[in-house]
Image (cartoon, helix red, strand yellow):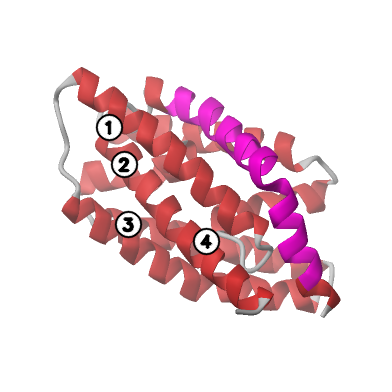
Amino acid sequence: MNNKTKRIIVYIVGLFILALGLTLNTKASLGVSPIISVPYSISQITGLNFGDLTFIEYALFVFVEIMIHLSKKNKKKIVADLLQLPLSLVFTRLLNIFSACIPTSSNFLVQLLILVLAIICTGIGAAMSLSMQLVPNPGDGIVQALAGKFNKSVGLTKNMFDCLSVCITLCISFIFAHTILGIGIGTVIAVLGVGRVIALFHHMFESQIIELVQEEKEL
């Protein structure tokens, strides 16, 4: 099996794990991750399908990415942006499948356990898919594009984008539901925990990732 095939397999498995992690985050009922808090809150208010709303959000992200890269006349980036659309469609279908299969629980200890599993899966899935340097998830792609546009670090841009997502979710919640939807202690724990899981994953598998990606680029 050549390195290209290995990268694709790791990438696909990472997306599956990431979709599972994001779904578990919603099932914990303690607050979802900021990036999906907007479609989640709208889904709770309107009853519309969560996966479909997430796809719409991702499509908006891709549109913004394309506008940014068009302004820089970066055609290679635009191709990668467009590839995020079919990726988003498949990814959000996975969200729907996992949402239909995984039950919710009202037991607080069970909710905490689900949240821990969600953070672990989200971190591992994100690390696996991002490390392979193929088509980025739109949630990551928009952050990278904005970071390049405003010449800011990806970490700072990610934090600011998460804060913006939370603010939009809170506004939607208070205006249309008169309560807080999708934001809770789980949101805070997810923001802090997922980054640590990603860092730990990279620390544990750094040499394998570098070897896999560099050898492929040299071919």
Find disc 2 in the rendering and name its residue: 24
Q: Is residue 20 above or below residue 186?
A: below
Residue at 80% x, 52% y is 148
Inspect the image, locate mark 1, and give the three-letter code of the amino acid beneath it: Ala
Residue at 49% x, 66% y is 12
Find disc 4 in the rendering and name its residue: 60
Q: Do labels 1 and 2 touch, CB within 8 Å?
A: yes
The numbered mark, 1 or 3, whose residue comes first in the sequence reads 1
Gap between marks 1 and 4 measured at Cα: 27 Å
* Left/right of residue 102 with respect to residue 1 in the rendered view: left
Inspect the image, locate mark 2, and give the three-letter code of the amino acid beneath it: Leu
Mark 4 or mark 3: which is in front?
3
- Label 4 CA crowd tier, 10 Å (few <14, some 14–19, many 20+): some
Q: Do labels 3 and 2 touch, CB within 8 Å?
A: no
Q: Nearer the viewer, residue 56 or 114?
A: 114
- State the residue lying farthest toward the front: 1
Instruction: Say which mark, if any, is on residue 28.
Output: 1
Gap between marks 1 and 2 measured at Cα: 6 Å
Q: Nearer the viewer, residue 64 or 1?
A: 1
Q: For residue 56, which quarter of the picture?
A: bottom left
Q: Is residue 173 above or below residue 14?
A: above
Q: Which residues are magenta?
A: 187-215
Gap between marks 2 and 4 measured at Cα: 24 Å
Inspect the image, locate mark 3, and give the three-letter code of the amino acid beneath it: Leu
Determine the secondary structure under disc 3.
Answer: helix
* Left/right of residue 88 with respect to residue 114 in the rendered view: right
Q: Nearer the viewer, residue 103 or 36?
A: 103
Is the magenta region chiefly helix, strand or loop? helix
Q: For residue 175, which quarter of the picture?
A: top left
Find disc 3 in the rendering and name its residue: 95
